[in-house]
Image (cartoon, rainbow, N blue to C red):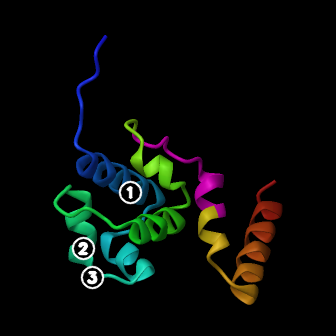
Amino acid sequence: MKRKSTKLTERVGRNVAAQRKSLGITQEQLATQVGVEPVTISRIERGVNVPSLTMLEALAGELGISIAALLDEETPAVPSEADVITTLMNKMKGKEKAFVLAFVRMYSERNR
């Protein structure tokens, strides 16, 4: 079966949007994390703007996936809850990370 060709910009946009939504973050939050205006993320997701290699690297890093996954014809698999937590915690520093980890441990021990 022959697959329909999709423009690269649309594919990247679709993959960015899918991964962003699976992480539960807004376009505004992603924009802040990569240092651009929210309209830039909107344009990338709609396939209007072509992100630079530097921007692809920043997006992939913040979304916790590879650049290859952003370029892939298949939409990245929806990450598990554990993958989402890992991605979010990897962005935290010392005390924040320790607090969240202690909270999760305490909560899980309470609900056994």
Q: Position of residue 57 (x, y in %)?
A: 48, 66
Q: Looking at the picture, which amino acid does disc 1 mark? A: Lys
In-image side of 86 versus 107 (left or right): left
Residue drawn at the location 37% of the way across and 49% of the way down? 15
Asked whether 39 falls inside the magenta stretch, the response is: no
Apparent side of residue 20 relative to residue 96 in the rendered image (left or right): left
Q: Secondary structure at mark 1?
A: helix
The furthest residue to the bottom:
95
Which of the labelled discs sits on residue 21, or is there none? 1
Q: Say above or below: 95 vs 13.
A: below
> Residue 20 at what x, y percent from top left?
40, 60
Q: Residue at x 49, y 44 (%)?
A: 78
Percent position of residue 41, x then y: 28, 69
Three-letter residue code for mark 3: Glu
Labelled pair 2, 3 in contact (Cβ < 8 Å): yes
| Magenta range | 75-86
Disc number for residue 37: 3
